[in-house]
Image (cartoon, rainbow, N blue to C red):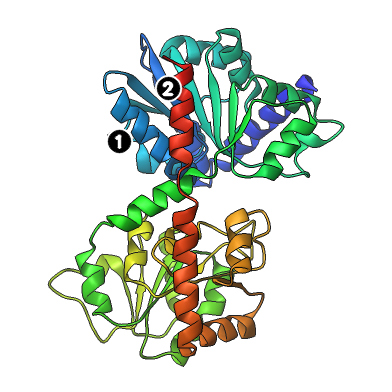
Amino acid sequence: MLLLYNVGLRLYLLFIYIASFFNTKAKLWLKGRQQIIKSENSSIWFHFASLGEFEQGRPVLEQLRQQRPNKKIVITFFSPSGYEIRKNTPLADAVYYLPLDSAKNAKKFIDTINPELAVFTKYEYWYYYFDALHERNVPLYIISGIFRPGQVFFKWYGGLYCKMLGFVSHFFVQDEQSKQLLQNINITNVTVSGDTRFDRVWANAQQPKALPEIAEFTNGGKVFIAGSTWPEDEKLLAGLVKDYPSWKFIIAPHEISEDKISSLINMLPTNTIKYSQLTTHHSPLTTQILIIDNIGMLSSLYQYGHIAYIGGGFGSGIHNTLEAAAFGLPVIFGPNYSKFKEARDIITIKAGFSIANKSELEGAVDTLINDEQFYAYAHKQIKKYVEEHTGATYTIIEHININNR
């Protein structure tokens, strides 16, 4: 099985190499791994797959940074979408791409940064890195972990992946199902802590970053915000604008390349402007649609909204619903949401809608806009849901402090 794992990694590297000739992300992925990694006498190592996992694990990172101000913090990312945006974060002393998993790379990297403990968020299970940490008796924590019956860990052929799980010192999982699945394969070092994303989005909603240009654009009116959208989402959203001329629409696409933004603008009415065209001195109040052509604003945008549409549900899965939910925005998303517990919960408490086509989207929006009683209920329920699920960070930090004094 280890042979197949190694072959799979080499094939992945070959695929990235070929893709790098025409794909910017692939090129960054390769180039970034040529960086020189600085030697540390001792450090705390956080690894994140991408930007979403960084935001998810950020509350734990911030707490450890605050509690251990003299300790070096090293962050690694697997994906360019995380590294390129957070490579200068003040929360870390060093930020790197994670070298491709191999016995040689894992030994060299861990010998160089000398972690006294390691924290991985939600996903990312790398055999050689986990094995190297285990051999050195370095505590390894998985936080905000989530497990499902269909994952390779629970298949008859998942022996190598089960072995990886055995290298983990403690799992902090989001729900009881995850704990039970791990216990079924004799892994008992598990705590149901919940999801640290709730702590992150709740803290953000209590003290959101002010965006003066957005406030001027919205001008105190009703605002529909579509976050992390893909072309399939945008085709549906384009028709809504004409139906609600008194509403402002803000669309933050998942991909913001020039051609993607141009394609989106071509779908929409002419009264559309890009964020990069706004200034605090000139905000066209007659413009109905604003396209966000940068990354990093979305979590603060929701403070100006009343209804949110979350993209990705017509692809591999929806993006972050909780950032909008923390501000009390009822959410709408596509049909592919079953892997996301919070989305299932939001449907259950009737604070959001899953839609599969244009007519269902129109029906959901019509209900939220015209049924004031329902809107008030959904607004209250979704905000309450987020607040009631905070606290995972405290549970994790308490355990780490007790076991690493």
The answer to the question of whether label 1 and label 2 lie on touching residues, with beta carbons closer than 8 A, is no
Query: Which residue in the protein does label 1 denote?
Result: 88
User: Viewed as shown, does residue 365 lie left or right of 86?
Assistant: right
Q: Indicate the position of residue 195 as horizontal and vertical percent values.
A: 52, 45
Closer-to-camera residue (388/198):
388
x and y percentages locating residue 276 in the rendered image: 27, 65
Quarter of the picture holding the N terminus: top right
Q: Is residue 263 visible?
A: no
Please give the name of the residue rendered at 49% of the width and 26% of the height, measured from the top-left corner.
399
Residue 364 percent location from the top left of the image: 57, 81
Residue kind at label 2, given as amino acid type: Asn
Asked if residue 70 lies left or right of residue 195, the reply is left
Residue sitting at x 62%, y 54%: 341
The picture places residue 166, in percent across and down from the top left corner, at: 69, 21
Q: CA distance from mark 1 to mark 2?
A: 27 Å
- Bin the neighbour count of mark 1 within 10 Å (Cα to Cα): few under 14, some 14-19, many 20 and up: few
Q: Tell which residue pokes out farthest to the left in this image.
A: 281
Q: Residue at x 35, y 33 (%)?
A: 63
Identify which residue is drawn at 63% across, 45% down.
Answer: 175
Q: How many marks?
A: 2
Say the numbered circle drawn on residue 315. none
Of 252 and 137, the residue lying toward us: 137
Q: Amino acid at mark 1?
A: Asn
Above or below 200: residue 11: above
Which image quadrant: the C terminus?
Answer: top left
Identify the residue under disc 2.
401
Whether residue 73 can be seen here:
yes
Q: Nearer the viewer, mark 1 or mark 2?
A: 2
Q: Secondary structure at mark 1?
A: loop
